[in-house]
Image (cartoon, grey):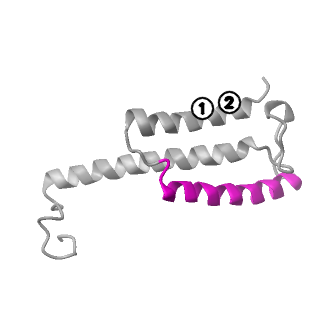
């Protein structure tokens, strides 16, 4: 199948978007912090994928990619990195929200209006 890698990477990005906006409703993907992290990792991936592909430490099958290389790594690999960053951000935000809710309900952490100082209770 042509562009197998693209289909898989777009599915990953789509899963992250659906989880972010429809299922978990974290609304974290398009925040400045997540987009900056994705940008840094795309640049890093671009450098290291090209080095590893040029050596060749690993090789991409041309028939499973779009055929657009930058210059030795396929463009789909950058989409994969963005999908991973998005998915990790969504799951991290959801996990932190659940943890904070659980701690607040158990009384281990008081809300900001109840605190008298900036330290957490021991």
Residue at the (13%, 57%) spot, across then down: 107
Residue under numbered circle 1: 11
Residue 88, x across and y down, in percent = 50, 48
Provide the major secondary structure of the magenta segment: helix
Could you say which disc has been placed on residue 7 in the image?
Answer: 2
Magenta residues (range)? 29-54
SS assignment at label 1: helix
Position of residue 35 in the picture relative to residue 79 (left or right): left
Residue 50, x across and y down, in percent = 81, 55
Whether tag 1 and tag 2 are in contact, CB under 8 A, the answer is: yes
Q: Residues within 10 Å of mark 1 (few under 14, many from 20)?
A: some
The answer to if 82 sits in the magenta stretch is no
Residue at the (82%, 58%) spot, across then down: 51
Q: Quadrant of the C terminus?
A: bottom left
Q: Distance from label 1 to label 2 (Cα)?
A: 6 Å
The image quadrant that residue 42 belongs to is bottom right
């Amino acid at each position: 199948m042509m562009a197998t890698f693209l289909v898989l990477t777009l599915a990953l990005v789509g899963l992250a978007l659906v989880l972010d906006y429809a299922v978990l409703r974290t609304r974290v993907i398009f925040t400045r912090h997540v987009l900056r992290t994705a940008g840094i990792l795309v640049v890093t991936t671009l450098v290291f994928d090209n080095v590893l592909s040029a050596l060749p430490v690993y090789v991409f099958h041309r028939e499973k990619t779009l055929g657009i290389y930058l210059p030795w790594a396929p463009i789909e690999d950058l989409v994969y990195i963005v999908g991973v960053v998005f998915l990790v951000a969504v799951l991290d935000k959801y996990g932190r929200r659940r943890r904070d809710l659980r701690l607040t309900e158990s009384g281990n952490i008081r809300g900001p209006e109840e605190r008298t100082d900036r330290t957490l209770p021991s």
